[in-house]
Each structure stands twice: as structure tokens, then as C-alpha cells.
């Protein structure tokens, strides 16, 4: 988790975090704790707390814009692994919390978000 992410958390509190149900530990080889998810439809689940607005992932701890962490970081979904600090999604979420955008950084140095 990048320093930007540990001081932010906006993505985890702005977007619905949905992913294929097989990523949950309800399926063999899945890692995301199923107890922290809710069904979206037959093949997708979402992290609890991200299915309504205002949104906040149940796995997010801390205060947005100050200090946060993911309580299941090692078990997080592919959706969470794909978000990059400073990308368009990140900066849109940061804007929703009145946080300054992260200036573009080279892809090879950008770290994966929560």
C-alpha cells in the first residue's frame, strides 16, 4: 500500500467494490472473507458497506484523508489490486473528499491501491 493510500482511503469510501464471487473464501482458492461480502447478483459480490451511498468498505479502518489501512490487505480482491494511486479513479474519489489530486507518476513507480 502506497504512502498516498495510507493517508487517503477515498477509493474505499467512494466506490462499490464488486468482484467475482469465486475470489471470496466461499470458493476453493478464494481469499476475500465471504462474511465481509454481500451478493450483487448470481456471479458478483461486493464488499459490505460499498453497496450504498455514502459508501465505506467494511475492511477500511481509520479516518479518510488522514490515516487509513485495509484490515484484509493480503486477502483483498482483484478490484482493489487494480486501482493505482494517482489514476483517474483515485483522483475522482479524492476530489469527493476535498483532497488534492495526486500528480501523475510513472506507471512503473505507481503502487497498487488498498
Image: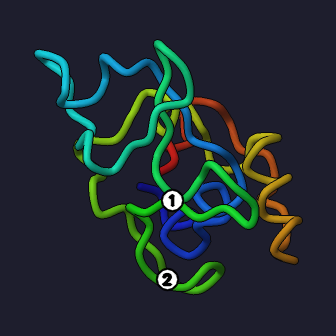
- Image point (18%, 30%), residue name: 25
Location of residue 87 with respect to 36 vertically, above or below: above
Q: Which residue lies under the disc numbered 2?
A: 67
What colouring method underlies this structural image?
Answer: rainbow
Residue 12, image x, y percentages: 58, 57
Q: Which residue lies under the disc numbered 1?
A: 57
- Asked whether, in this view, residue 96 is left or right of residue 73, the answer is right
Location of residue 76 with respect to 1 vertically, above or below: above
Residue 112, image x, y percentages: 49, 41
Q: Nearer the viewer, residue 34 or 6?
A: 34
- Image point (18%, 18%), residue name: 27
Tag 1 secondary structure: loop
Q: First in sequence: mark 2 or mark 1?
A: 1
Crowd class of label 1 (few under 14; some 14 to 19; many from 20; radius 10 Å): many
Q: Judge depth for marks 2 and 1 and give the one in front.
A: 1
Q: Nearer the viewer, residue 4 or 62?
A: 62
Q: Quadrant of the N terminus?
A: bottom left
Tag 2 secondary structure: strand
Amino acid at each position: 500500500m502506497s504512502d498516498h493510500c495510507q493517508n487517503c482511503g477515498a477509493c474505499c469510501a467512494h466506490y462499490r467494490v464488486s468482484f467475482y464471487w469465486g475470489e471470496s473464501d466461499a470458493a476453493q482458492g478464494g481469499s476475500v472473507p465471504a462474511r465481509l461480502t454481500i451478493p450483487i447478483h448470481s456471479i458478483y459480490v461486493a464488499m459490505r458497506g460499498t453497496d450504498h451511498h455514502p459508501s465505506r468498505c467494511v475492511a477500511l479502518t481509520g479516518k479518510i484523508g488522514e490515516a487509513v489501512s485495509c484490515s484484509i490487505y493480503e486477502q483483498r480482491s482483484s478490484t482493489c489490486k487494480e486501482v493505482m494511486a494517482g489514476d483517474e479513479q483515485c483522483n475522482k474519489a479524492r476530489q469527493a473528499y476535498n483532497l488534492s489530486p495526486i500528480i501523475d507518476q510513472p506507471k512503473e513507480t505507481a503502487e497498487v491501491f488498498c
